[in-house]
Amino acid sequence: MAKFCTTPRAAGAPRWAAAKVGLVVEWIVRQEYCLSKGGCNPYQRGGTGTDFFDELSDTTRCRFLASFLATRQPSVNEGSISADCEARKKPVDADDDENERFAVPDIITHEPGARMEFYEIKPNSVTGRVAGRAKIETFLSLMDFLADNDPLFEKYEKGKLFDPDRTITFYQRNYLGIVPCRVSLHYRRATEPEIDRGLIVYEICVEVDGELLEAFAKAIIVSAIIAALAALAAIAVAIFGGGILGPAVLVFNSPLGGSVGPDGTNDSQDVRYVQALVNDWRATTDGSLIAVDGFFSEETAGALSDFQSAAGLEDTAGNLTPGDATETELESTHLNNLMAAADLSEIQPEGGLADLVFGADPDGVDTELEEEQDLQTAVNAFVQQYLQDLRDTV
């Protein structure tokens, strides 16, 4: 099997979904980080914890960091740090070097004499690594500033004691009935020459048959992200009341350009899409697969008719038009199949991951993450784009 790795954004996931994948990664890395150091004492406001984790904040990240620094370093002015951070959270002028973003690391440990270090977690892309390095250097500048103003201030250094390199499989199936695949999350300490320490990078990897890798890799990764988010949403019952972001509640439009069937217009790409979805269903019933060749043959008509009969649809003549019951049922069956392939057992999300991923962000809406819309609308659009890309690529 060949392997292809990329970031969620590069695979085609929208910003909001990629951000939620980032939260999952931070949660997983925190578990391993604490295990590697023999346990953690997570900081919460008003407490005395020695380990700061960005994703555990119950307030804005700026206030959370300021509170941690002031708790561990008595000379730090909490109000000043918080205000400065809020003011510089986003630069007014990106070309002004004096107006840099305020850096809030993902992990900081305050153990004088043993472990005074911090880490940043970023997607493993050129832009991700550049942004991670910039954030590290910005936080180091803050350390220098605070130390210059108080000789008793104990600076945090770029982390070097934590050196992870882990792969977690969370999705495995025969994609579209013909592509055996396995999707995993991989994270590691960045070892690129320009980054000596302090940065952890992650990516999503898919392993498939070599000849099919290039054509299907990104679609498989996107399908795995959709499946994983749906599985997490099913766990977050306190937020959704037991509702699942699955096919039953999704709303999307047909990506087909025209009708498919004995009397259809039968555009070759539309036919290939229908053939692929039919194969995805047939594979789950141990049925023989049909050719995905773009030609509407008797074989395709028979397979489509079999699906209609099995689904209890009125029309069993092998006809399909954009948005009709047959197409909707075909796509819903495909989405059900891919969501059933998610396996989060290795991630062990029951400890609060789902609530973290789908809970309210204390920092509020970030328009850069396209989160103006509600979650269900966002998922609908995500699935809509996935189906459209699948139709255009298959």
Image (cartoon, helix red, strand yellow):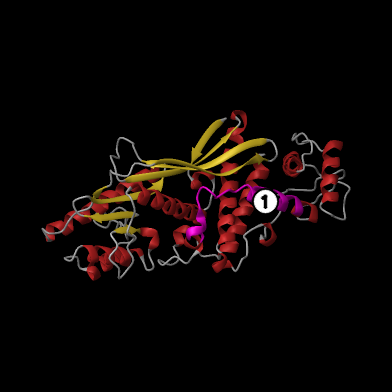
- The secondary structure that most of the magenta stretch takes on is helix
Residue 382 location (% of width, % of height): 59, 54
Residue 268 in the magenta stretch? The answer is: no
Residue 308 location (% of width, % of height): 83, 50
Residue placed under numbered mark 1 in the picture: 335
Residue 343 in the magenta stretch? The answer is: yes
The magenta region covers 329-354
Residue 136 location (% of width, % of height): 29, 49
Residue 80 location (% of width, % of height): 22, 68
Specify the farthest residue to the front: 38
**Going by the image, does 81 lie left or right of 218?**
left
- Quarter of the picture containing the C terminus is top right
Q: Which residue is drawn at the image coordinates 12% and 57% (left, top)?
A: 148
- Helix, strand or loop under label 1: helix
Badge 1: few (under 14), some or many (20 or more) residues near its Cα, within 10 Å? many
Residue 214 placement: quadrant: top right
**Going by the image, does 265 lie left or right of 157?**
right
Q: Is residue 338 visible?
A: yes
**Going by the image, does 305 lie left or right of 35?**
right
Q: Of residues 205 and 384, which is closer to you in this image? A: 205
The count of marks equals 1
